[in-house]
Structure formats: C-alpha cells, structure tokens
Amino acid sequence: DSGALAVLHDEVADCKQRLLASLRREELARRKVSALRDDGSAALARCQRQQSYTRNTDAASRAQQAHQYVFVRGIEKSGTSWIKMLVDLHDEVYMAPYELQSYLVFSLLTSKPWLGALPPYRKVVLDVHDELVHRIMQRMLQLNPSARVVGEKSPKPVAPYLRGARYIYVVRDGRDVLVSMFYHQLRLGGFDNWCVGRDAFVPATHRRHYEQHGDDYFERVAPHALLSDEECVRQVARHWAATVRDDLETIARIDDEMRAESGGGGGSRGSGGGGGSRG
C-alpha cells in the first residue's frame, strides 16, 4: 500500500545518505593518508640530505684532523723502527712507544671465509678500521697536548690507509731484509717465523753457534750458512717482493686520487687503498 511504499522510500533515501556520508569520510581519510605519505617522503628526503651532509662534513673534518697523524710503514726488518725514532726526535711530534697493528684487525676480519671478505661488508670493516685508528690517534693527541703531530709505526702494508694522514714508507733492499731477518731470529731465539712449513726461519744449530761465537761465526767462519735453507729464503724473498709491489701500487693509486681531487675529480672507496680507492 501507499504507506508501506512511503516507509520503504524513506529507508532507501536514508541508506543512500549514509552511504554518501561514508564515501565522503573514506575519501577524506584517503586524502589525509596521501598527505601524510607525501609529508613523510619529504621528511625522509630531508633527513637523508641531512645525514649525507653530516657524513660529508664528518669526513672532511676527519680528513683535516688526519693531517695531524703520521704513520711509518714497510715490511719487517726494513728499518721502520729506526725511522720512527728519528721522527720522534722532533719537538712537536709524539710517536707511540708501541705498534698499533690495526692492519691485523682489518686483515683478520676481511679474510675468507669470514663475512667481512664479501664486498657488501668489506666497506663496513674498513669504516670500523678507520674509526678505530682515528679515535686512538685523537686520544694520543689529548694525552700529549704539547704534540702537534702524533704517529706510530707498524711493519705492515700501507693499505688500509687513513685518508688525509701522512705516511712514511720504508723500502729496503730485499737481500738486506733477508740477512736482517736471519740475525733477528738468532738474537730472539725464533720469536718470529717468516717461513711457512718450518719450525723456524733459522735452524736451532745456527742459534747454538751464535750463542757460542756471536756474529763473527757467520760473518767470518761460516758465511755460507747464513742463508743456507734455499727453499725458506726463496719463500721469504717472494713475500718481500709481493708486499713491496702491492704497496707501490697502493701509493700510485693514492697519487692518482690526489691528482683527481685537486682537479675536481674524486676517488671511490674500494678494496685496494684508503680514502679514495682504499683497502
């Protein structure tokens, strides 16, 4: 009847109004979400720009501070200790009494099969290495306020190197290095062993002769015994040659990066050297 139809018409109209109101609320909510998303993206972009600026500023500050650092590098028995003592004579320089050996940390963490050997993580290890060295050197400056420059020597490769720092690289004739290693072993009784697969670089009989007769035994009586283990001598010589070659390549890479930066270019951090292509 007409009364029932009127009620039904009113209910349909009311439902339509509620539906339209719900759609309007949904559209308003969608716009708010979109606005929030846009605001969030803008805020994230600003944050990323700020972080990038902060990182670049920190890197520039670190590089400037690193000019206060000096490192002596070179393979074992090349004269790094002697050079360190000469540098330490300067009134405004303080050289650490002990070796830092940060290379050992980097080498261990980036060796296979460890995670740091993989390219995505190697850079993280490199950043940690840089931070470690930087903080130690800054602490040295704090503890030695009269020093304008602080440094240390470690008979290790140049890489990884700290961007902006000064390096003194010592190269000694490989034959002299071998002889020095021989006497080093004699005097310290096998403290270090550069010959893989041997109990020691110097046989025990040689050490007994040294203890009984001193240096003269090998210089005057038995010079042929000085480097008598040919296999071991060749192994150490190959190690010397490979290390010096890698160091000279790293130094050449540093020179290229410095020239590129002075000409407006820039290096990229990698696995070879430091600062730019480092490692």
Image: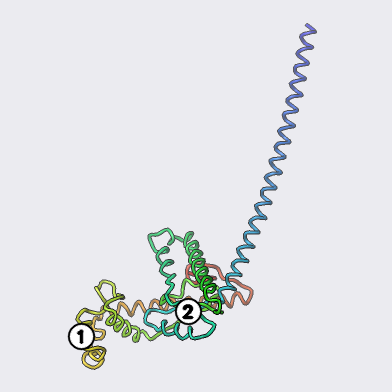
Q: CA distance from mark 2 to mark 1?
A: 37 Å
Q: Residue at x 38, y 77 (%)?
A: 242
Q: Residues within 10 Å of mark 2 (few under 14, many from 20)?
A: many
Residue 248 or residue 78, whichever sits in front: 78
Identify residue type, mark 1. His
Compared across the picture, whether 28 is left or right of 126 comes to right
- Residue 14, placed above or below residue 139: above
Identify residue type, mark 2. Met
Q: Residue furthest bottom?
A: 220
Residue 165 or residue 68, whichever sits in front: 68
- Residue 244, placed above or below residue 18: below
Q: Residues within 10 Å of mark 1 (few under 14, many from 20)?
A: some
Query: Which corner quadrant of the image does residue 191 belong to?
Result: bottom left
Please report whichever mark, 2 or 1, sits nearer to the chain's N-terminal start.
Answer: 2
Q: How is the image coloured?
A: rainbow
- Residue behind mark 1: 209
Q: For the residue labelled by badge 2, is the local secondary structure a helix, a strand or a loop?
A: strand
- Residue 215, placed above or below residue 24: below
- Residue behind mark 2: 95
Residue 233 image offset from top left, x and y in percent:
28, 80
Quadrant location, the N terminus: top right
